[in-house]
Image (cartoon, rainbow, N blue to C red):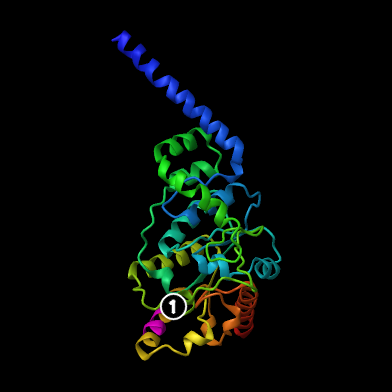
Amino acid sequence: MKKFIIKTLRFLIPPLVILGIGLFIYVHTIGIENLPALNFSSSYSYNEKIRFLKNNSITPEVIAVGSSMTLNNLSSEVVTKEFQNNNYLNVSSWGVKTSEGYKLLKSLYDLNEFKQVISVVNIGDFTKASKKIDYNFIHHYLTNDDLKTTYSIARNFDLHYYLKNIDYANYVRNCNKDYDYLNYDDYGMVKFSTHGFNIKDERWKNNRLDKVPDIAEYSYLDSIANFCTKNNIEYYVFHSPHRMGLIQELNTQENEKFDSHLKKIDRIVSPKHYFVNANDTTWHDALFVDGIHFNETGAKLFTQYCFDRVKYAAQQKP
């Protein structure tokens, strides 16, 4: 048995040493900062955001959580100005559903008790969640638990994921005229360029109303509202609009579906928190990069509009 173990080790050690040397040379060549984000989830955007949070020194008192609606449409400049607080982080990423936002919010609250939460939403945020997310891995990573993080890296290791995303990581961090852009500002927002953006026709014409909402996702919105109430957190829900050219083309069935969706959110949020429906006014096509995502100029105007509506509503209260 002893001879077998020795022979096995002699067989395994050389290729492992070669692999280790090769990995060291590769990392040294491209730089550790250029490696793909760790695979905390099945969403690369989500993984990049966790990487950003790890490398960020802000202790947040204000948190923005949600999908690309919050990632791209909520202006950090306006948020920090309105709250007069730079201790703000946008923890949003592509396709985050309400249930996933709720779970991330609770996980982050265990690390730091924030005072305000903002979510920018659209109907797509309420479709069925499908991402695989390892919240324990995220917790170990963000709390600097090196031993458990190492274990999670080994347990979740997927060579195909890292090979596939070596070039993609570099692409999303630099493609500032494309939808995949993931270079964050100081607070975690991704700004879409107002000029020269590569607009795709199929996205420009897509109103996203073909999506089927999942009633469970509205329940999770209620869970977020209750969580915020319980912990004395102010909760702001801003509903992002469609561009003017699309909203004018909605048929009766689409309008009814959209109105029903808005009423559900209003019933859940408005009694104790703040809900602003930005579809109450029209938004010029020049402010968008597709049917529902604002460019940087549009994001500023939208965010300011929402805060102005909140302040106006507060003034009307007896």
Q: How many marks?
A: 1
Q: Which residues are magenta?
A: 257-261
Amino acid at circle 1:
Asn
Q: Which residue is mark 1?
A: 206
Write the residue at 42% across / 71% down: 124
What is the x, y in percent for residue 23?
52, 33
Which residue is at the front of the view, 190 or 280?
190
Which residue is at the front of the view, 76 or 314?
76
Mark 1, other Cα within 10 Å: few <14 / some 14–19 / many ≥20: some
Q: Is 141 on the left-hand or right-hand side of 184? A: left
In the image, residue 194 sits, relative to residue 113, either above or below, namely below
* Quarter placement of the N terminus: top left
Tell me where residue 142 sits by quadrant: top right
Q: Can residue 318 be seen?
A: no
Magenta stretch holds residue 162: no
What is the x, y in percent for residue 150?
48, 35
What is the x, y in percent for residue 213?
35, 72
Write the residue at 59% across / 69% down: 74
Report the predominant secondary structure element of the magenta stretch.
Answer: helix
* Quarter placement of the C terminus: bottom right
What is the x, y in percent for residue 50?
53, 51
